[in-house]
Amino acid sequence: MSEMLSKNPSITTIKNILSLHVLLDYFGAKKLHQIRDGSALSATMFQATGSAPGSAGFVNITDVKGGKVAFGPKDNGGNLDVFYVKSVEEIPYNISVIQISKLFPSDVAAAPTPAPSAMNLTHIMSAHGCKVFADTLIANPDASNTYQDNIDGGLTVFCPLDDPFKAFLPKFKNLTASGKESFLEFYGVPIYQSLAMLKSNNGIMNTLATNGDKKFDFTVQNDAEDVTLKTRSTTAKIVGTLIDEQPLAIYSIDKVLLPKELFKAAPTPAPAPAPEEAADAPKSSKHKKPAADAAPSDSPADSPVGDAADQTADNNASVRLDGGRLVAIVLSLCLGLLLL
């Protein structure tokens, strides 16, 4: 490894070289010495990432004389000069770590690549639907320099798409100069976060604008495959990946995320008061006299009222009848006494 590191390669070149040494198949010591037909061609992570042109990301594995196993990248002209040394760790059919004699020689993987700090952030944004945000960032040199200075150490950017940010521009123009700078820096996070890392790490995330008690943070939350960013007043969703090459990741979001330090959340409307009875409305009488022409009710609730009325009428008739009988008896007695 020291020979490679002595050339001071960029982190992207190191990534390509290392990914060439990760085979996308299981090769333990036993399998290496029992390769069918004596030779096999295996894809690597370098091939799978799409960084390798053509089939440069494949590695040839061959059993050679003397019980040795040799390796050679496909773009190495057929030379097999890297040899298996020993097994370091094996979890059968899942993971195998083996020691080899030296790095796989590959001009493609070792080719110089631009340093991350040389990447043009605003160009990447403009080419993938975030031109309005990129132009606004270019117009603010202090914020733009803050982004650029953080690339080498790791940077994740969330840029709003053109339509929502264009609609927001009138509010942005009303901010103070320091407010504009903090607002733009609020969309950058000073660490590298792949999409897989964002999906597995929910919680509060500080930004380039974070400064002591001025938090300028937001909450990352995921739901299945969706990743959302939340502040007190807004929720935005990641809708695209512009670039994801460590140490830089840029994602597009569908809304303009508003930091609570610059924008207050809309107050929750109070519930409407219950309607009050008008002061001059006539009050209902406790003893309401039924209308004479009211139709009788057929409901069961009304039926007991009718039965009570009939019972009262029967009782009154009985009283009248008994009274008549009493009068007749008294008169008969008087008439009998007179005759005597």
Image (spheres, rainbow, N blue to C red):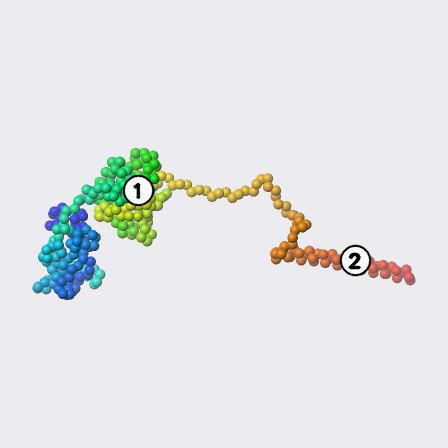
Closer to the eye: label 1 or 2: 1
Helix, strand or loop at mark 1 = helix
User: Where on the picture, by quarter, is residue 99?
Assistant: bottom left
**Residue closest to the eye, 121 or 232:** 121
Q: Residue 203: in sight, yes or no?
A: no
Circle 2 sits on which residue? 323
Q: Secondary structure at mark 2?
A: helix
Find residue 1 and report its horizontal and vertical position in percent: 13, 51
At a point 50% along the width and 42% down the height, the residue shown is 273
19 or 204, which is in the foreground?
A: 19
Q: Amino acid at mark 1?
A: Asp
User: The disc labelled 2 sits on which kind of residue?
Assistant: Gly
Residue lying furthest left in this view? 66
In the picture, measured across the screen, residue 2 lies left or right of residue 272, that is: left
For the C terminus, give its image quadrant. Answer: bottom right
Instruction: Determine which of the numbered discs, if any, sits on residue 162 in the image.
Output: 1
Q: Is residue 91 above or below residue 210?
A: below
| Crowd band around label 2 with a 10 angstrom C-alpha radius: few (<14), some (14–19), many (20+) | few
Nearer-N-terminus badge (1/2): 1
How far apart marks 1 and 2 lie (CA) works out to 102 Å
Q: Nearer the viewer, residue 233 or 214?
A: 233
Does residue 303 show up? yes
Residue in view at x 36 percent, y 39 percent: 263
Residue at the image position 19 percent from the left and 42 percent from the top: 118
